[in-house]
Structure formats: C-alpha cells, structure tokens
Amino acid sequence: MRLVIALVTMIALVTPAMAGMPEYTLVLHHHTYQPQTLKIPAGTKVKLVVENKDATPEEFESTDFSREKLVMPHGKITVYVGPLRKGTYRFFGDFHQATAQGRLIVE
C-alpha cells in the first residue's frame, strides 16, 4: 500500500511539471527536418515531438545532447532534451545523413 501511495504522489508531482514544459515539433519530410534550425531556451527541459511523414524509418540522433531514437514511417516520437547551456547543438537523421540535418540553438 505504501508503494502505491508513493507512486501516486510521484505521478502527481511530475505531471504538472511536464504539462508546463515547452514543446516543439520537428517534421521529417523528404528526408529533411523542418525546421532545420530550432531555437529553445537555455536552462529549460523541453519536449521535442518528431513526426516522420516519409514512407521509410529514420533515426533521430544527436551526439551533442546524447539522444538516439527510431521514428517509424508516418509515426511520431517524443524526445526530452535539456536543460542545455547556451550554444548550438547538432542533430541528424542517421539513415539519411546527407539531407536530414538540423541544429538546436539554445539561447
């Protein structure tokens, strides 16, 4: 019973924090990210929704902020990023590196 109460309390505390989290959307179309440059606030955790409109899978990846996640064709994923310091952080599509390139500008 104590475990259940502890879990309910944790969920109650986390849910409002995530509800106020800034959310940004990246769309993959023709193996390119739109927008290719995304500005986010420094020192803040953000939610990135990556939507793949292509008929092939892609892997959203960033070695700069250590994320790697598969996006199925016509699917969506959520990636939580940050908080990050001011600067520019690169992300890319691992399966189409020649075209699927982008940057997070943190200011």
Image: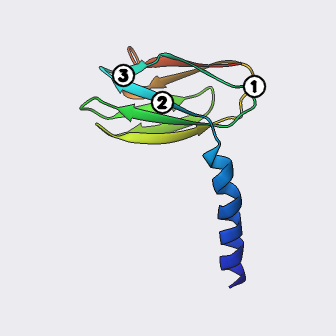
> Residue 25 bears which disc, if any?
2
Element assignment for label 2: strand
Name the amino acid, label 1. Answer: Arg
Q: Which quadrant would the C terminus be assigned to in this image? A: top right
Distance between the alpha carbons at the discs numbered 2 and 1: 20 Å
Q: Foreground residue, 88 or 96? A: 88
Distance between the alpha carbons at the discs numbered 2 and 3: 19 Å
- Residue 64 locus on image (x, y percent): 62, 26
Disc 2 or 1, which lies upstream in sequence? Answer: 2
Q: Foreground residue, 38 or 71? A: 38
Element assignment for label 3: helix
Identify the residue under disc 3: 96
How packed mark 2 is, by other alpha carbons closer than 10 Å (few <14, some 14-19, many 20 or more), is some
Q: Residue at x 30, y 30 (%)?
A: 53
Q: Is residue 73 left or right of residue 13?
A: left
Element assignment for label 1: loop
Name the amino acid, label 3. Answer: His
